[in-house]
Amino acid sequence: MGWLTWQRFRCITDCKKYPNECISEALITRTADIMVKEGYLQAGYNYVGIDDCWLERERDEHGLLVPNKERFPNGMKAIADYLHNKGMKFALYEDYGNLTCAGYPGVLGHEEVDVETFANWDVDYVKLDGCYVETEKMDTSYPQFGKLMNKTGRPIVYSCSWPAYQKKPDYASIAKHCNLWRNYDDIQDSWGSLTNIMNWFGDNQADFAHYAGPGRWNDPDMLIIGNFGLSLDQARVQMAIWSILAAPLLVSVDLATIRPEFKEILLNKEIIAIDQDVMGKQGLRVWREKNIEIWTRELFDGSYAIAFVNQRDDGAPHSVSVTFNDMKIEKQGYKVHDLYKEEENRYIGPKEKFETRINPSGVKFYKFTPNRLRAVEIV
């Protein structure tokens, strides 16, 4: 869990024209301060990450990476120290090619010295993109880079973009060598982009869902909640489905200007707990009919998180009545708790159908707790 610059701030580098949005030390420290003050760190968002565009255009005379001198005047070690002093961790972007996607120096040909540099800067998380890399070489180059990081002795989370660039990724190898990996296209700030990613994950889940687990995660990309492209209902959809997918919750939004209703979604403790469930089992899309979907995730205590998503746009809430088999859960009695707190708790017996009503481009998100677990809680 954490915050990344890219989706909201992209490659804004003109600090005179856009002083509050440029990729800079000031943006990072300001965001970290807000994350501590406004409860994001306490909720679990502990990584603060700089994506592309933090570098000078050339390496120095010793072949070392150089942070932009104007925008990062104190260097990356100072940023790491600032974050660590606040109880946070430092994430940094690079690319396996000779250039990053935005045209800054990549690691190709400098792998060992760059890994050593990251370790010296006390980086806690490296996101390694795949622009300007031959895709057939990724199967050996990404594992090798991970081995170099392990050699430093510093624990560094390894975020790979490896499968996002391949038609038939070797997920067994990816899960062995990476902590998380981007599976598909970059998310854009729109409902269309969000549903495109959701549909791709649902259509292809048999290929990769079973590789997810503690320490290794499929990554559908950043949370765009609180930016410009999603309504409140649509933002709730993303938070629900990302938690069903056991996805990394990496926010990319201006936390200084986010509206309270979107902040409430990001800080929903019960949904964060679903996402961070200790069993780490990725949920699945288990039912789809006329653009209404059910996504179900089994939790460590025998409960289920179930999201009912309406991708229809025909202007009215849509009612569904489904069976236990439709939801792919055990047939027994459940307490049903609305994780967005729009409904009172209710109870469903093993012979009943479950009914709910979902707004257009919206979601109903529930936790189904077996009655036997509720009885234990009462005792």
Image (spheres, rainbow, N blue to C red):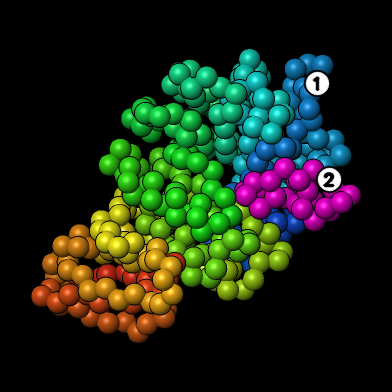
**Mark 2 or mark 1, which is nearer the start of the sequence?**
2
Q: Which residue is mark 2?
A: 14
Asked if the stretch drawn in magenta spans residue 8, the answer is yes
- Residue at the outermost bottom position: 344
Asked if the stretch drawn in magenta spans residue 77, the answer is no
Q: Is residue 336 left or right of residue 18?
A: left
Residue 340: percent from left, percent from top:
43, 74
Which residue is drawn at the image coordinates 81% and 35% (left, top)? 68
- Residue at the outermost left position: 351
Let me know if residue 294 appears in the view. no
Q: Which residue is mark 1?
A: 60
Mark 2 nearby-residue class (10 Å; few <14, some 14–19, many ≥20): few
Q: Which residues are magenta?
A: 2-28
Q: Is residue 168 above or below residue 374?
A: above
Q: Is residue 134 above or below residue 118?
A: above
Residue 296 found in image quarter: bottom left
